[in-house]
Image: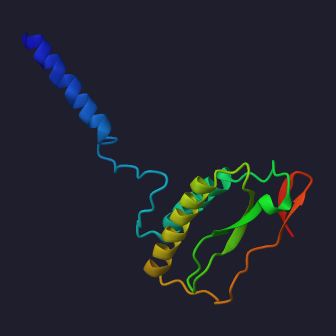
Amino acid sequence: MASKVVHCLVVAFMLSACAQGTAGGPETPPSSKFVITGDRDKDWAQIVALEDQAKALVKTAGCTSADQCRGAPVGNRACGGPRYYLVYCSRTTDSAALFTKLKAVADAEGEFNRRYQIASTCEFRMPPNVALVGASCQAQ
């Protein structure tokens, strides 16, 4: 009976240690969570990683008409508005997942801009004209 109790305690301890991450190391934040570290380069790298995750969701192929092609805003410039737009096919791209990820990018970049007092030009970036070329959506 005592050996079962000891075994259960060892297993519980091991599970607890695994849940807390590596011993002595910080927990790794979820990949879609932005955490200011105080290191500008590392913080920007987090934003780039989020942006790459958004780009991975984009599908440009598979549309049958130009009205299925769209542009999605990326980022949050210090003066407002997106840095650029991603062109995607609304028929083959999970638009909800894409816009959720792009919101995370914009929120992270807004926080980054405030933290590091980033300035930018204030011209408004318009969404691109999109067209269907073959079966692929492209900016014109």
Q: Position of residue 97 (x, y in %)?
A: 58, 53
Classify the position of the C terminus by image quarter: bottom right
Q: Residue furthest right?
A: 134
The relative height of residue 72 versus residue 27 in the rendered view (above or below) is below
The relative height of residue 18 versus residue 39 in the rendered view (above or below) is above
- Towards the viewer: 43 or 62: 62
- Towards the viewer: 43 or 58: 58
- Towards the viewer: 89 or 115: 89
In the shown orientation, is residue 8 left or right of residue 22?
left
Q: Which of the 4 image quarters holds residue 114?
A: bottom left
Identify the residue shown where x is 63% and y is 56%: 95
Q: Position of residue 21 (x, y in %)?
A: 34, 42
Identify the residue shown where x is 78% and y is 54%: 60
Q: Position of residue 102 (x, y in %)?
A: 58, 63
Q: Indicate how the structure is coloured in the image.
A: rainbow
Identify the residue shown where x is 61% and y is 60%: 51
Counting the numbered discs, the total is 0
In the shown orientation, is residue 14 left or right of residue 124?
left
Identify the residue shown where x is 54% and y is 59%: 100
Classify the position of the N terminus by image quarter: top left
Q: Residue furthest top?
A: 1
Q: Position of residue 13 (x, y in %)?
A: 21, 30
Q: Residue furthest left?
A: 2
